[in-house]
Each structure stands twice: as C-alpha cells, then as structure tokens.
Amino acid sequence: MDRDHHLAEIVDELVAMPAFGVDTEFHREKTYFPQLALVQLSWGDRRALVDPLEVDLAPFARALEGPATVVMHAASQDLEVLHRACGVLPRDLFDTQLAAGFCGHSLPSLSSLVERYYDVHLPKGDRLTDWLRRPLNEDQRTYAAADVEYLLGLQEQLTAHLAERGRLEWALDECQALRARGQVVRDPDDAWLRIKEARSLRGETAAVARAVAAWRERRAAELDQPVRFVLSDLAVVGIAQRRPKAAADLARIRGVDERHAKGRVGEGILAAVAAGRNQEAPRPTGPAYELDRKYRPAVALVAAWVSQLARDLEIETSLVATRADIEALLAGDPDARLTRGWRADLVGERIRRLVEGEAALAFDGRGNLLLEDRVPQADPAS
C-alpha cells in the first residue's frame, strides 16, 4: 500500500476494531536513527503492507492512540521505530512474546510460537534482506505478511491461557511496562557507559571519556551515522587515557586516523577533552544502592530458589526476578521491581522474610529447594 488515502481508509477501520496486529521492518546498520522500511498490519481477516517510503505515516498515530489493543511480538525495537515515525506509542499493547513467557513458553520467537499453536512453519526470510530496496519481490511480501498473520489468533489463545492460570494481569502489567520503555531517549552524557573499557575508568580520565563519548553521540545524531563511523570505542578510551591538548598529540593515539585529528572534527574532539578536564569526575558505575556484604551469600541461594519457583509455575525466570532484581531488593532500593505489584506478593515478601530470619530454605530430599516458615529458637537463658 503506497497511497496516503489508502492508509487513511485503513486507519478508519483500525480505530473501530478491538485489536490489530503490527510489525515493522527497519535498518539501522548505516544510520544513527532506525530507518523504517515497511509496516505490516492485520485486522479482522485483512492484511496490509504499508510503504513508509511512499506514505506519510503520521495519520497512523490515530490508530496507535485509539481504543484498539495493538498486538506485537518482541516489540521493544518496533516501539522505538514507530515512536520516531509517528510521534506516539500504542495506548494499549499486547506483546505475544511476553505473554507466552507467562504461559510456560520461555520467551519464544514468533515462528516457534506459531508452530506450537498452529503447527505452521512460517516462511524463512533472509536476515540480510534489504527492505529499503524497491520494488519488494513476492518472497519478501509473503515473509512480511506472515509476521502479522497469526498475531491476533495468538493474542486470543494466550489471553485465554493467562486467564485460566490467573496471570492475565501480570502479563498485561508487563506489556505496559514494555510500552513505557518504547520512547527511547539517549542522553549523550551517558554514552560512555556503553563502552565496556570506559566503565572501569576513574577520575579525570573517566570525565574525559564521558565528554568525548558525548561529543561522538551528538555528532553521530547530527550526521545520522552509527557512532562507530564517527569514532571507535578504542579511540574514545585512548583519548581519555592520553588527554591530548593538540592535534599532533591526538593523531598519535591508537584508533585515531588523520580525518579525526584535523579540521572541525579534531577541534571538536580537543574541545571535548578540555571540557572533560574541567568537569567533575563521574561516580563509579553500579547500582544506586550498595548491597550489604552480609547479604551477598544469600543472592545465589535466592536466585536458585527463584529459578526453581519459575520452573514450577512455568514462567520465564527473567520475568519473575533477575539477579539484579534480587540484589536491588536486598540493598533496600525503594524502586526495586520486587517491591511492587504481583512480584512483591510472589517473591518480594518471601525473600524479605527469608533474609530477616522469618523463613528458611531447605532441600526436600529430591534436590528441590523449599521456602519454609522458621520456628523461632527458644532462648536458652529463659
């Protein structure tokens, strides 16, 4: 579909539907921002492929913000792409991968989920397909349409299974949390934290790494190029460690070539180095709340119990609690995931009782861990 009036007609239908399916194809290998190449839609018994290279997607925002539930699979990157293209996020999101995680299916691919529920093998696509090249051939169209063909049916079946298990609200809460993360905002001052070798730097060296990485991030966004095209991670760390004051010094750093050391680029890097020297050193990276040493031995044991509990309940373990979630709870972080909602009831309160001595973990003789109430010991002096 490559005409604006056709999209307008489809949007009119979508806002009247209880739900519709969405998927996207995009590229970001050669750009800073994702390039949207195709939008696939399903509603009722209809399907459509929308060409964003020919159609203004702005009117699609009305469907995303409308009353219909937007059904997607593994939606995190698609949400970012749609928000950039339309300026909005779905009002109500149902992610079939997340929902399946609450039904004993781990976090499956769409193809494995369709095979499980429909005994259908989705057509395989070439992961190197150039979705920006026109015209799309028949195989590309078939593959793209298949990505939304079963979304609404999966939503219905997964919703029924979740309701039977009493987990529908859990899954819907998780979908809304995913939706809230869809508006991706990259703070340039945090870019240095995505460089593994930079996270261990301290003092002025860390401050310069932060400033140079922030300059690189802004430059990449301005040029719409991947950050690695602007300056490599190796160069950022090398510059931070050497802290050059002149172009000649800059040129001798590993990872810095001639184009980086001269002209506006060189001036920008040197200005960032100078700014970093005058900035307060960033705090060491890590959790905002430090875990008390006395609780460290408990983390591995609690993680093992959570993993077993998740298997027993047939829920993907990472949806129940990650190791970071456990550490945040034990460190007293008030924003810890395990202090809120269904997680607090399922594991958060039980972990609290465990570390406060009100409960204990024991083996049941078959290799399983049991969380049991702890009988208070009588005071020998009484």
Image: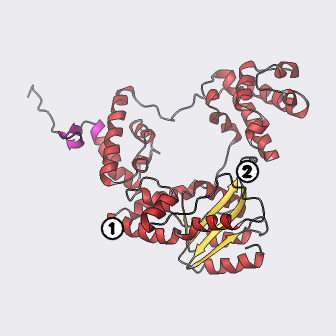
Q: Position of residue 125 (x, y in %)?
A: 62, 58
The residue at 33%/47% (across/down) is 347
Residue 208, quarter of picture: top right
Q: Which residue is mark 1?
A: 164
Q: Disc 1 or 2, which lies upstream in sequence? A: 2
Q: How many marks?
A: 2
Decide: is 94 above or below 68: above
Q: Is residue 278 visible?
A: no
The residue at 31%/48% (across/down) is 309
Q: Which residue is mark 2?
A: 33
Residue 58, quarter of picture: bottom right
Residue 356 on the magenta segment: yes
Q: Quadrant of the C terminus?
A: top left
Left or right relative to 256: residue 101: left
Task: Return the residue nearer the eye: 220 or 52.
Answer: 52
Left or right relative to 182: residue 169: left
Q: Quadrant of the N terminus?
A: bottom right
The residue at 69%/68% (across/down) is 138
The stretch in magenta equals 354-374
Which disc number belongs to residue 342? none
**Local secondary structure at mark 2:** loop
